[in-house]
Amino acid sequence: MEVMLWNDKRERDMYENFAELYAIIKTTEKLEKAYVRDLVSSGDYETECLKLITQFKNLSSFLRDVVPSVESFAETYKMDCPAALNRLIVSGVPATVEHRTASMSSSSSGSSAAVVAECVQHFITAMDSSVGISGEVGWGIVPPDFEGRVKVKDWILRLSKMGAADELTEQQSRQLHFDLESSYTAFMAALPNAGS
């Protein structure tokens, strides 16, 4: 006796999309565990994680009406994947990007001019295009509680949660521009020997 899981093409597509979402979540969980156990290099981890995050965002925006909550989806299908849900929903960026500032603070002061120049470049690009900056460079030369770092990280998280078709409102765009500009000003003021 054959059991059909779907009655028409639309239902079949829905179940196939559920399978894709399930696979992305499970794969991300395995990747996170492999990275923590140092079984995969940072470069390979970051590349694969970015690909999974992008696939997740695209599929999530596509399934928004059918799967309003990925957490509920994971619970319904008894998925125990806390690391994947954190990476895909909460953080939205690979751990290497999220924690890169810690390694930057241990870099030598000899390369600080290059780091500053790259960070300034990201600020200018972000302000010109109203797109969030990567936040992964330059922060090692300012204190961890630096207000600009907090603002930029908040924007990175906010933007990473947006779907491909989502747009900032006029008010959000102005706030982003203001936060970037004030963060840049504070960053320049916080540089060692900023006055000379």
Image (cartoon, grey):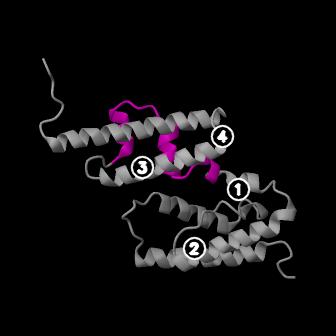
- Image coordinates of residue 82 in percent, x first then y, are 49, 37
| Distance from Cα at disc 2 to Cα at disc 1 | 19 Å
Q: Is residue 82 at least partly visible in the picture?
A: no
* Residue 134 to residue 177: above or below: above
- Image coordinates of residue 87 in percent, x first then y, are 52, 46
Q: Nearer the viewer, mark 2 or mark 3?
A: 3
Q: Amino acid at mark 2?
A: Ala
Residue numbers of the magenta segment: 69-97
Q: Which residue is mark 2?
A: 126
Q: Secondary structure at mark 1?
A: helix
Residue 159: within the magenta?
A: no
Q: Amino acid at mark 4?
A: Ser
| Distance from Cα at disc 4 to Cα at disc 3 | 21 Å
Q: Amino acid at mark 1?
A: Thr
The answer to which of 72 and 137 lies nearer the viewer is 137
Q: Which residue is mark 3?
A: 55
Q: What residue is at 15 percent from the left and 24 percent from the top?
A: 3
Q: Which residue is mark 1?
A: 101
| Distance from Cα at disc 4 to Cα at disc 1 | 18 Å
Q: Is residue 16 at least partly visible in the picture?
A: yes
| Distance from Cα at disc 2 to Cα at disc 3 | 24 Å
Q: Are marks 2 and 1 in contact (CB under 8 Å)?
A: no
Q: Quadrant of the C terminus?
A: bottom right
